[in-house]
Image (cartoon, grey):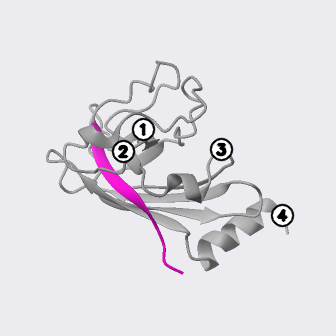
Amino acid sequence: MNLSDYFAMALESYLPAATASLVGNADYPGLEGMVKFYETSYGGILVSAEVTGLPPVQDGDGTGFFGMHIHESGDCTPPFAETGMHYNPLGRPHPMHAGDLLPLFADRGYAWNAFFDDRLTIRELVGRSVIIHRLRDDFTTQPAGDSGEKIGCGVIQAVAR
C-alpha cells in the first residue's frame, strides 16, 4: 500500500489518537472546528483540521490563509494569552519548530486540510493547544511567523480507547 492510500484509509477508517475542539475568541465567537491527530507506522502523525467561522480577509473576497500552530500550554482561557509560544523542544528557528503546522486556506470562512508531520508524536501533543491565528504565517519572521492575533484555540486531548 502506498502512503497516499494509507493516509486516506487512516482518515476514513481509524479513530484519532487525540483531538482538539476549537473555539473562537470574543471577536470571533462563530469560529469552531476540530483538529484530529492520528498515529502512523511511519514515525510521525497524520493531522486533519476542519474549521468554520474564519473571518473574511481584508480585500473581501472571502478567501485567505490563517496560521495554525501547536503552542506550549493547553490553557484556552480567552483571549488565549496563556498558551505560551510555539511548541519548540529542540530550540529551532521558525518555521522549523515542531509546533509549526501547515496553514489553513479558507474559502467563505471554511477550511479543511490534512497532512503528515514526522516532527511530532501523540504523547508530546496531549495537554498542549492548537492555535488559529488571524493572519497567515510568513514562514520567515522570528520567532513565530508574524501570524497575528490568536483567534481560535483548542486543548489537545487523548481519545479514550
Where does label 3 land, which residue?
A: 119
In this picture, residue 107 sits left or right of residue 124: left
Identify the amino acid type marked 4. Asn
Where does label 2 land, which residue?
A: 132
Q: Position of residue 83 (x, y in %)?
A: 33, 42
Instruction: Assign a secondary structure to mark 4.
Output: loop
Name which quarter of the figure residue 38 lies in. Answer: bottom right
Q: Position of residue 139 (x, y in %)?
A: 52, 26
Mark 3 or mark 4, earlier in chain = 4
Instruction: Assign a secondary structure to mark 3.
Output: loop
* Of labels 3 and 4, the one closer to you: 3
- Find residue 139 and name its label: none
Question: Disc 2 to disc 3, how far (Cα)?
Answer: 19 Å
Task: Name which residue lies at 35% across and 55% down.
Answer: 154
Mark 1 or mark 2, earlier in chain = 1
Where does label 1 land, which residue?
A: 67
Where does label 4 land, which residue?
A: 2
Question: Disc 4 to disc 2, how far (Cα)?
Answer: 31 Å
Q: Position of residue 116 (x, y in %)?
A: 66, 52
Task: Name which residue lies at 76% across and 67% down.
Answer: 5
The dominant secondary structure in magenta is strand
Dot 4 surroundings within 10 Å: few (below 14), some, or many (20 or more)?
Answer: few
Front residue of 89 and 120: 89
Residue 152 in the magenta stretch? The answer is: yes
Identify the amino acid type marked 2. Ile
Identify the amino acid type marked 1. Gly
Front residue of 73 and 64: 73
Dot 3 surroundings within 10 Å: few (below 14), some, or many (20 or more)?
Answer: few
Front residue of 135 and 152: 152
Q: For the magenta stretch, what is the residue range?
A: 150-161
